[in-house]
Image (cartoon, grey):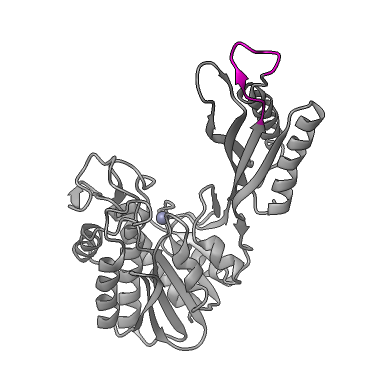
Amino acid sequence: MERDALITLLGELVSIDSVNPSLSPTHRGEWELGDFLVDRLRSLGFDTKRQEVEEGRFNVIGRSGRGKTLLIVAHMDTVGVDSMTIPPFKPSVIGDRLYGRGSADTKGGMAAALMAIETVLLEDDLRGELVFAATVDEEYEAKGAEALMREIDAEGALVMEPVGLRPVIAHKGFAWQEFQVFGRAAHGSDPAKGIDAIMRTGRLLEKLKALDRSLMRRSHPLLGSPSLHASQIEGGEGWSVYPSICGLRVERRTLPAETREMVDAEFNQIVDELQEEGIVSRTEMRFFREGTEVDEGEEIVRSLMRAMVAEGMDCSLAGMGAWPEAGILNRSGIPSVVFGPSGCRGHEADEYVDIDSVRRCARVLRLAIRDFLH
Ligand SMILES: [Zn+2]
């Protein structure tokens, strides 16, 4: 793979602002990058489509060949740029790094995939169908991936994320849980009447801490232990008022075997225990994404591992704590592996990607595509 061509392509991708408009409403969204990709895919002979996800936001889907389908997914959106200490959309190359918003997450992987696809298509006719999908909204609600599943079915998928050139087959899930602890409002001088909801929330926090400790006894070979943390707390009206209510938001990170019902039951158990102590509270799950895991015997996993071995790379399987779009694909019955270059983790003030890792990623993808669609 030509280093210069790769840097040019990656630079073009980074220079197009595709900040997720749900995260940063002052930005225009993903459409400009979408238009760029439509042109690029068309020039490669792909059958190309804009799939509207919501007004002004579309996935780009390119299809080539027919038969057994391999899907490659890269999200177009990036996180915001407010905290950035480098120019977000003026990519700069320093040593082996290319800096800019999205360079790692996930335009590096996108560039690698495009380069790999280009090479494969030049080499010979595909025996099977290659689908490249660029999605919107991964960094917020993953509406793009959800919509994509209404349009595409595949025998296997590669999901591009900056995972340091490791085949990631397991992902944690997460739950957002809301608690309310109740007290009784009264003037601060009236302890006989007042019941302090914030003080009572202290008991809830103790119990959550105990639950978190007990979660450490559960473990997954690639993901480690589940966990929880208190995310936000809200309550109180003023110095001299007993607060009648305190709200607490908790995030729980889950293992693939932990279901929504299990997580919900554990939190409700705490509410019951508080009740026995005379503390009234309630809890509700606001959002849940299940963790997922692909069997290491799946063909797409084997294809990727063989490609890595052929490139002389360590192909030991890995897991990731964050939740990628692969979860949605797996749930829809498409075995998916997350793969991509290395750099900083993305989302950071001086995001960069290691250029050499993008080149290696492209080489591995080329071999994996050929292996899967043999
Ligand atoms: Zn990402």
Q: Residue at x 34, y 64 (%)?
A: 110
Relative to 253, is 312 above or below?
below
Q: Is residue 187 magenta?
A: yes
Residues rendered magenta in the picture: 182-193
- Foreground of the two, 133 or 231: 231
Image position, residue 117 (x, y; %): 35, 75
Decide whether the magenta segment is chiefly helix, strand or loop.
loop
How many marks on residues?
Answer: 0
Question: Ligand 1 shows up in which quadrant of the image?
Answer: bottom left
State which quadrant residue 256 falls in: bottom right
Relative to 310, is 276 above or below?
above
State which quadrant residue 190 falls in: top right
Q: Residue at x 69, y 18 (%)?
A: 193
Image position, residue 162 (x, y; %): 40, 53
Q: As drawn, is 359 to the left or to the right of 295?
A: left
Q: As drawn, is 11 to the left or to the right of 240?
A: left
- Foreground of the two, 153 or 94: 153
